[in-house]
Structures are given as C-alpha cells and as structure tokens.
Amino acid sequence: MILFFEKFIFKRFFLVSALIGVLTFQISTPVAFAIEISEAARTVPLNASGDPITLSEQRISNGQRKFNGTCSSCHLDGVTKPNPDVNLSLESLALAVPPRNNLEGFVDYLNHPTTYDGQASLEELHPSKSRADLFPKMKNLTEDDLVDMAGYVLAQPNIVGRLWASGKPGR
Ligand code: HEC
C-alpha cells in the first residue's frame, strides 16, 4: 500500500514537472527568437559621416512595433506602395538629398520630409511630427520612437538581407 502510494506521488510529480517543462519552453522560446539579433546587425550609421551607433534589441523591437503601426500601410517590408521608385532600401536612402541612410537623416525626414532631390517640402503629403495635425498617428510618437523606427529600418538589410525593400514575399 505504501509502495503504491509512493509510486502514485512519483508519477504525479513526474507529470507535473513535465508539464512545467513544456509550458516554460513554449513561453520562453518565441521571446528568445525575437531578441536574437546580433550586435553587428544592430549597428547602424548615426550621421552622414558614418559614425556607428549600436541600438539595443529593445529599441529595435520598439521601432518595429511603431513602424508596423504607423508606416507599414505604405512601406510594408521596405517598399513604397504609392511610389515604388523611392523605397526604404539603403541604396535609395543613400541617394536622397540629404542622404537618409543614417539615423539623423532618417529622423530629419520624419520631422521635415522632402522630395527625393531635397528641393521641396513634403510636409503636407508625407506623415511627419511637424504636421501631426494632418497625420494624427504621428502625435503619439516621441523623438525616441522616431530614432527607434529609423534604427529598425536601417538594420533590416542586416537582419533579413536583400529581401528588404525587394518587393518579394517570403520574409
Ligand atoms: C500614405 C503613405 C505613406 C505612409 C503612411 C508613410 N510613407 Fe514614407 N513615403 C511615402 C511615399 C509616397 C514616399 C516617396 C516620396 C517621394 O516621392 O519622394 C515616401 C518616402 C519615405 C522616405 C524616403 C525614402 C528615400 O529613399 O529617400 C522615408 C525615409 C519614409 N518614407 C519613411 C516613412 C516612415 C518611417 C513612415 C512611418 C512613420 C512613413 N514613411 C509613412 C508614403 C508613405
């Protein structure tokens, strides 16, 4: 009888610990995948001189969240639906005037967007902080959020490679 009871407890203990193991695995695995971005991939140019800056995983994922909520209706996966010639690839951003392939230049665009040649303001046409009255989604974004979105976009070629802004699915 005592032996049976011990066996029963042991079985219960085994089942419960197996269950905890499975649950812990399920809870922790997606998080572990989500934050596995190497330091090199999170290092992007800060300014036009190319000084590097490394953003934390938290800031990149905040940038991703804010980008998805604010920009992806037009810029899903780095393309520009309304004007595919001016996309969010590093090549396109680099040739804009001024260059937008660095944190400062990118954030400047989100405060004062301009045409690709830099000649005219797009503030009334493109979402920006300065015209949050016209683009209400911009109202809730802080200056840090703008930096994080820029970091997310500039790091994408390091993370997903040439699929970013290619217009090809399969990411
Ligand atoms: C309503 C559609 C729309 C939304 C929403 C939008 N954009 Fe754009 N974006 C465009 C268009 C169109 C262009 C090209 C403008 C031009 O013709 O120069 C552009 C251009 C840009 C450029 C310049 C690209 C280059 O190669 O020089 C950047 C940077 C940019 N967008 C970032 C963003 C970010 C970040 C957000 C979210 C906060 C955003 N955009 C939201 C339509 C949009």
Image (cartoon, rainbow, N blue to C red):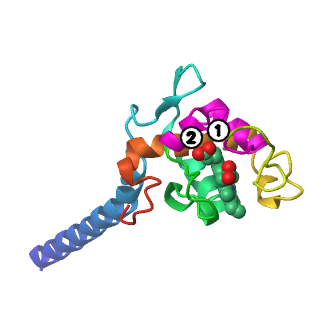
Q: Which residue is label 2 attached to?
A: 93
Instruction: Give the x, y percent position of residue 74.
Output: 62, 63
Compare residues 20 and 130 and report the one nearer the observer: 130
Query: Can residue 105 be spotted in the picture?
Result: yes
Query: Can residue 70 be spotted in the picture?
Result: no
Compare residues 104 and 145 and report the one nearer the observer: 104
Looking at the picture, does residue 122 appear above or below residue 44?
below
Of labels 2 and 1, earlier in sequence is 2
Dot 2 and dot 1 residues touching (CB under 8 Å): yes
Instruction: Identify the residue at image location x=38%, y=61%.
Output: 171
Compare residues 87 and 47 and report the one nearer the observer: 87
Residue range highlighted in magenta: 90-116
User: Does 61 sit left or right of 134 as displayed?
Assistant: left
Instruction: Give the x, y percent position of residue 137.
Output: 77, 59
The circle on residue 106 is: 1
Q: Of circles 2 and 1, which is in front?
A: 2
The residue under label 1 is which amino acid type?
Phe
Instruction: Give the x, y percent position of residue 18.
Output: 24, 67
Magenta segment includes 93: yes
Q: Cβ(mark 2) to ligand 1 < 8 Å?
A: yes
The residue under label 2 is which amino acid type?
Leu
Looking at the picture, does residue 130 appear above or below residue 80?
above
Instruction: Identify the residue at image location x=66%, y=33%.
Output: 105
Q: Cβ(mark 1) to ligand 1 < 8 Å?
A: yes
Instruction: Identify the residue at image location x=73%, y=44%.
Output: 110
Looking at the picture, does residue 36 appear above or below residue 167?
above
Magenta segment includes 125: no
Instruction: Give the x, y percent position of residue 71.
Output: 64, 58
